């Protein structure tokens, strides 16, 4: 293990020097590098910006930075990409005029002076972020180190996207960000505006091999900072009783599960064939939102995005006290302002699914606070600010 750590440290030093040297070469002014969730997905805000540029600005060269373990997904779709930390990646990243990513870059990668870094981020904040966190419980770091690294990373950001005025104020403070904030709405939610009709919903269901005659529940929880196998590898204990849900809801519903990208679990749902489906590795959660009649989540920012569809939401927050008081803390009174019922047991989840089936939720106040900018034009606003 010590030998591996020494080799890794030596590689980083040499790679950093090479990156710095190549970064002094002239920029490729039309090259845009994209990355989503550490190179694991073709998704989120970077995908929306990529697709907008691809369709409206063919003068740019668009490349994705991809973790080699996930490169087959990009090959199958014919998406131009380079493998993260390869020699080719070094030359592309160091000479690119633009970086577009939704998560942090490794702190040891130096940003060239000619590069414009667009940080899209990936959620409207409920749980406290970065400098606003009282304590950090993640593996491989401590509170001081985590905040120092985050601060150093945010110094590199030239632009930061905000989905609403509420997020703008938090991002400025929590990230110590003082450059250009683009308060545009999230580009990734453009899809929910223009694709939200029966024809597209049925097309997506058919492609995903989901039954057309059943309603769809989406379970999309977040990760817990203090539940992990190691650095960057978090565990998750599913507290929903899927057997009970299948028994009481299976005639009318199916459930699709989407774990957070940091969670390392391999779900075995073979006992619930035809009722429970694992879409944790599906390329982009936006299609799962679209086909779902109700969302079950906890403290994940997915509920801010799902609210654009104005469909019912249930908050399965079995550990709300410890999460609120010990792990993260919230930016607002979640228990009184959540746009749906908060429950702690599977029995209560089932009860609310049945109630919401008959009495759809009304989320106008929540929508007007958090989703008012998302009208299908967010990608265009961002591109017009950064690239024009």
Image (tube, rainbow, N blue to C red):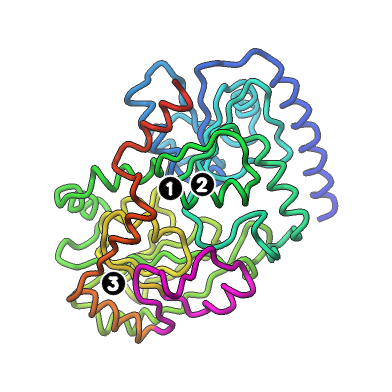
Question: Which numbered mark, 3 or 1, is in the foreground of this view?
Answer: 1
Q: Which residue is mark 1?
A: 164
Question: Which numbered mark, 3 or 2, is in the foreground of this view?
Answer: 2
> Which of disc 1 and disc 3 is earlier in sequence?
1
Q: In terms of secondary structure, where does tag 1 sit? A: loop
Cα–Cα span, label 1 and label 2: 6 Å
Quadrant of the image containing the C terminus: top left
* Magenta-highlighted residues: 316-345
Assess disc 2: are there few (<14), some (14-19) or many (≥20) residues with their C-alpha within 10 Å of its C-alpha: some
Assess disc 3: are there few (<14), some (14-19) or many (≥20) residues with their C-alpha within 10 Å of its C-alpha: many
Q: Position of residue 279 (x, y in %)?
A: 38, 59
Q: Is residue 294 left or right of residue 63?
A: left
Q: Which mark is residue 98?
A: none
Q: Which residue is mark 2?
A: 168
Q: In terms of secondary structure, where does tag 2 sit? A: helix
Identify whether 7 is placed above or below 224: above
Q: In terms of secondary structure, where does tag 3 sit? A: loop
Cα–Cα span, label 3 and label 2: 40 Å
Q: Position of residue 99 (x, y in %)?
A: 55, 31
């Amino acid at each position: 293990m010590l030998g591996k750590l020494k080799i890794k440290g030596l590689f980083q030093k040499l790679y950093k020097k090479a990156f710095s040297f190549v970064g002094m070469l002239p920029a490729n002014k039309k090259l845009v590098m994209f990355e989503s969730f550490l190179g694991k997905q073709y998704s989120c805000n970077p995908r929306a910006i990529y697709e907008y540029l691809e369709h409206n600005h063919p003068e740019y060269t668009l490349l994705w930075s991809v973790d080699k373990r996930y490169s087959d997904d990009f090959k199958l779709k014919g998406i131009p990409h380079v493998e993260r930390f390869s020699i080719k990646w070094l030359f592309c990243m160091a000479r690119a005029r633009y970086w577009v990513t939704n998560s942090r870059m490794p702190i040891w990668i130096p940003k060239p002076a000619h590069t414009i870094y667009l940080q899209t981020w990936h959620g409207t904040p409920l749980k406290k972020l970065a400098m606003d966190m009282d304590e950090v419980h993640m593996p491989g770091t401590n509170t001081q180190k985590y905040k120092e690294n985050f601060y150093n990373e945010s110094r590199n950001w030239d632009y930061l996207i905000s989905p609403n005025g509420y997020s703008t104020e938090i991002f400025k403070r929590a990230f110590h960000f003082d450059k250009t904030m683009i308060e545009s709405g999230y580009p990734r939610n453009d899809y929910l505006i223009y694709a939200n009709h029966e024809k597209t919903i049925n097309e997506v269901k058919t492609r995903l091999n989901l039954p057309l005659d059943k309603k769809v529940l989406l379970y999309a929880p977040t990760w817990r900072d203090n539940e992990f196998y190691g650095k960057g590898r978090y565990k998750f204990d599913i507290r929903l009783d899927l057997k009970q849900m299948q028994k009481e809801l299976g005639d009318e519903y199916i459930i699709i599960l989407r774990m957070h990208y940091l969670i390392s679990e391999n779900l075995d749902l073979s006992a619930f064939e035809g009722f429970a489906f694992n879409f944790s590795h599906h390329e982009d959660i936006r299609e799962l939102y679209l086909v779902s009649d109700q969302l079950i989540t906890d403290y994940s920012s997915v509920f801010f995005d799902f609210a654009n569809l104005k469909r019912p939401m249930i908050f399965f927050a079995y550990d709300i006290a410890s999460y609120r008081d010990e792990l993260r803390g919230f930016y607002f009174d979640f228990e009184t302002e959540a746009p749906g019922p908060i429950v702690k047991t599977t029995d209560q989840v089932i009860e609310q699914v049945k109630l919401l089936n008959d009495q759809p939720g009304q989320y106008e106040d929540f929508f007007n606070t958090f989703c008012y900018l998302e009208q299908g034009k967010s990608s265009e606003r961002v591109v017009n600010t950064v690239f024009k």
